[in-house]
């Protein structure tokens, strides 16, 4: 083990001493995956392998503001309700990933697991913009026989191997097994400041050759991050998180978007996953029976904050796991079916409960739901509006979606709220920090409120 590898492991071990204090925080969630300490962002390496679900994620354990080493954290469990945290899985401890083990994916292959990710390296010998020069983005493979013990790192592609028309921003490999071999997509930024996806193929999952570059006929953002490519019911869906798309009243309201192209990669065929304040960098996986999505319930470079949890020593969560269903070329999202088992007793609207599900049916135009006197959800004739009325939003203001609401499922979990309209036709995710937890409803609808029990989470980080 090198000196750097020893140093990073000592840092992680020291940081873990803060886990009990962080766990006592006022705004810790009950049924969302969070970092035990420090910072969390992109979900990575999602898979079901050898009887366990594995959820890796971008992890900066040293700081709730993301400073320090950028590694992969690791949760695993037999279902989507019982989890064990296994600590840091991938450290940025080689010359190929010295400035961060960035996002990637996991692939169940035969009797083992393959993990593909981006190793980020920034030169520091002079001033660089790290867009046109000064950055290396290495595509790295790690094999595992059991999902926990990881083998040696193997560099598959380096910056010099990528097409010359791209900047140094190429990252986030998502690899799938196909009938012909292996397929990998990478997100990228062309030198003309247009987003694009690089599609590679391979016979052995090691030697990859570029097949084509996918981009929109007219510029659609300057960078496409976190690509994903899969087929449902005969339609191929290309998922990206485009940066630099102009904001509109009902679309692209966040600083960056996340969505998918259905069949054709152009703006006309693009649909956003989530219309709320806090959703980015999603990843999907096939668990043998269904396609499941996790997103990062956060957003980079925002004008609002999450100061209350930063003060507690942690930041960000993942969304609930969402099952995808295809309907007429659109993807609907609803919480995974087993999360219904978390439902407890029925509550009144006045009961103080920080973790609950609110079911609305037969929603009439003009209905308003007020969560904790902080977040107002308005269901108008042709639109749904989220509007913060107090500083519980920490600078968040308003988000809108063009949708006629018939039903809604609202999941409140202490400091994160997910809203599913019309069985997942439209979804909103937001962080919020209320002082109390009651519900008020104005207008016409049938409403029931249920307590939600939390995930069972334990720590096993002495490996």
Image: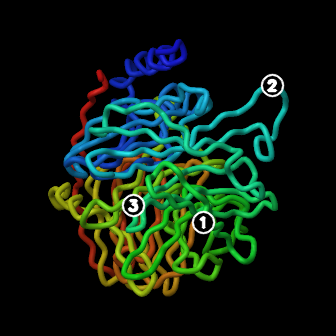
Alpha-carbon neighbours of circle 1 within 10 Å: few (<14), some, or many (≥20)?
few
Residue nearer the viewer, 357 or 374: 357
Asked if residue 327 lies left or right of residue 400, the reply is left
Note whether residue 286 is visible: yes
Q: Position of residue 93 (x, y in %)?
A: 53, 25
* Gap in angstroms between the C-alphas marked 3 and 1: 16 Å
Q: Are marks 3 and 1 in contact (CB under 8 Å)?
A: no
Q: Position of residue 239 (x, y in %)?
A: 52, 66
Alpha-carbon neighbours of circle 2 within 10 Å: few (<14), some, or many (≥20)?
few
The residue at which mark 3 appears reads as: 177
Residue 332 image-quadrant placement: bottom left
Image quarter where the C terminus lies is top left
Asked if residue 373 lies left or right of residue 136, the reply is left
**Disc 1 on helix, strand or loop?**
strand
The residue at which mark 1 appears reads as: 211
The residue at which mark 2 appears reads as: 125
> Of discs 1 and 2, which sits in the foreground?
1
Q: Residue furthest right?
A: 127
**Disc 2 on helix, strand or loop?**
loop
Visual colour scheme = rainbow
Asked if residue 361 lies left or right of residue 180, the reply is left
Chain-order first, disc 2 or disc 3: 2
* Gap in angstroms between the C-alphas marked 1 and 2: 35 Å
């Amino acid at each position: 083990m090198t000196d750097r590898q020893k140093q990073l492991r000592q840092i992680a071990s020291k940081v873990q001493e803060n886990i009990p204090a962080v766990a006592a925080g006022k705004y810790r969630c009950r049924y969302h995956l969070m970092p035990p300490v420090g910072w969390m962002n992109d979900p990575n390496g999602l898979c079901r392998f050898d009887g366990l679900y594995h959820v890796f994620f971008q992890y900066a354990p040293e700081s709730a503001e993301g400073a320090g080493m950028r590694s992969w954290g690791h949760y695993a469990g037999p279902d989507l309700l019982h989890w064990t945290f296994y600590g840091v899985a991938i450290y940025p401890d080689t010359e190929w990933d010295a400035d961060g083990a960035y996002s990637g994916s996991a692939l169940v292959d035969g009797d083992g697991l393959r993990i593909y990710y981006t190793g980020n390296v920034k030169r520091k010998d002079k001033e660089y913009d790290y867009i046109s020069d000064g950055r290396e983005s290495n595509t790295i493979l790690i094999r595992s026989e059991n999902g926990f013990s990881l083998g040696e790192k193997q560099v598959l592609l380096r910056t010099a191997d990528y097409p010359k028309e791209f900047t140094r921003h190429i990252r986030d490999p998502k690899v799938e097994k196909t009938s012909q071999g292996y397929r990998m997509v990478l997100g990228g930024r062309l030198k003309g400041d247009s987003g694009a996806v690089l599609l590679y193929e391979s016979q052995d999952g090691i030697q990859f050759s570029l097949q084509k570059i996918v981009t929109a006929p007219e510029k659609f953002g300057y960078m496409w991050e976190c690509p994903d490519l899969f087929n449902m019911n005969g339609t191929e869906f290309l998922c990206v998180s485009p940066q630099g798309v102009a904001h509109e009243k009902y679309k692209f309201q966040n600083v960056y978007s996340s969505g998918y192209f259905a069949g054709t990669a152009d703006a006309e065929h693009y649909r956003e996953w989530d219309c709320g304040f806090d959703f980015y960098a999603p990843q999907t996986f096939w668990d043998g029976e269904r396609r499941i999505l996790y997103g990062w319930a956060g957003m980079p470079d925002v004008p609002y904050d999450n100061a209350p949890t930063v003060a507690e020593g942690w930041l960000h969560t993942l969304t609930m796991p969402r099952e995808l269903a295809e309907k007429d070329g659109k993807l609907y999202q609803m919480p995974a079916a087993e999360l219904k088992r978390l439902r407890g007793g029925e509550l009144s609207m006045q009961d103080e409960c920080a973790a609950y599900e609110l079911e609305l049916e037969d929603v009439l135009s003009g209905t308003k739901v007020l969560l904790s006197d902080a977040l107002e959800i308005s269901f108008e004739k042709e639109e749904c509006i989220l509007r913060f009325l107090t500083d519980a939003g920490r600078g968040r203001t308003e988000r809108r979606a063009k949708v006629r609401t018939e039903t809604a499922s609202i999941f409140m979990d202490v400091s994160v709220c997910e809203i599913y309209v019309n069985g997942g036709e439209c979804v909103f995710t937001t962080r919020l920090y209320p002082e109390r937890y009651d519900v008020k409803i104005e207008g016409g609808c049938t409403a029931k409120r249920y307590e939600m029990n939390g995930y069972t989470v334990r720590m096993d980080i002495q490996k």
